[in-house]
Image: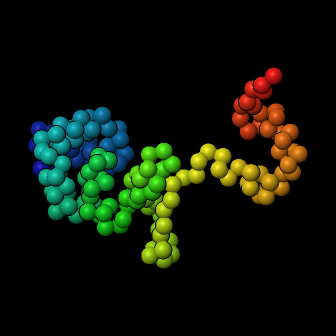
Amino acid sequence: MLPLEDRHFGDRAVSRFANFEVRRDHKEELVAILDETFAQRPASEWVEILREKGVPTAPILHMPQALEAPHTLHRQMRVKTIHHLWGEIESPASPVRVGDLSELTYRAAPRRGAHFEPIVTQLLSCSDERLAELSAHGAFGKVPEQED
């Protein structure tokens, strides 16, 4: 299938690489052959060769390449939000898309502790007294030193 040299695969290839089990037994040898072979051409050529043979394939992209790829831009996989210290920042969007995509909105993550009180008092039904007691014992982090 691949344009590999006969010196690697020749007549012995049938027995050494015939199925998954024997390929696993000869894994180190096969990986060395494939590494040497794939190093002989750029990735773009291998992607074309493999696609022509019907092998589902795509190049592995580095982050800057992935962020500029046409499908990334088309799916709006880069979003802008406002960070409380750095202003407008761009970051990857969630790949999970459900429902009406026209109403997608993004916002920065909340600051640490921003929703602490409503979560522990409303969601967890923690009384103000219990919250004060737990806080005094460091349950939510280091207790600040008291001034004398």
Does residue 141 appear to the left or right of 73 in the view shown?
Answer: right
Does residue 124 appear to the left or right of 41 in the view shown?
Answer: right
Between residue 85 and residue 43, name the one nearer to us: 85
Can residue 3 be seen here? The reply is yes
In percent of the image, x 77 and y 58: which residue is there?
123
Between residue 43 and residue 14, name the one nearer to us: 43
* Quadrant of the drawing holding the C terminus: top right
In percent of the image, x 45 and y 74: which residue is there?
101
User: Vertical placement of 100 versus 1: above or below?
Assistant: below
Can residue 9 be seen here? The reply is no
Residue 47 percent location from the top left of the image? 19, 55
In percent of the image, x 79 and y 58: which residue is there?
122
Does residue 5 appear to the left or right of 77 in the view shown?
Answer: left
Residue 68 percent location from the top left of the image? 27, 56
User: Vertical placement of 47 versus 16: above or below?
Assistant: below
How many marks on residues? Answer: 0
User: Vertical placement of 28 versus 62: above or below?
Assistant: above
* Quadrant of the drawing holding the N terminus: bottom left
Of all residues shown, which one is farthest toward the top? 148
In percent of the image, x 12 and y 50: which residue is there?
3
Of all residues shown, which one is farthest toward the front? 148
Does residue 133 appear to the left or right of 21 in the view shown?
Answer: right
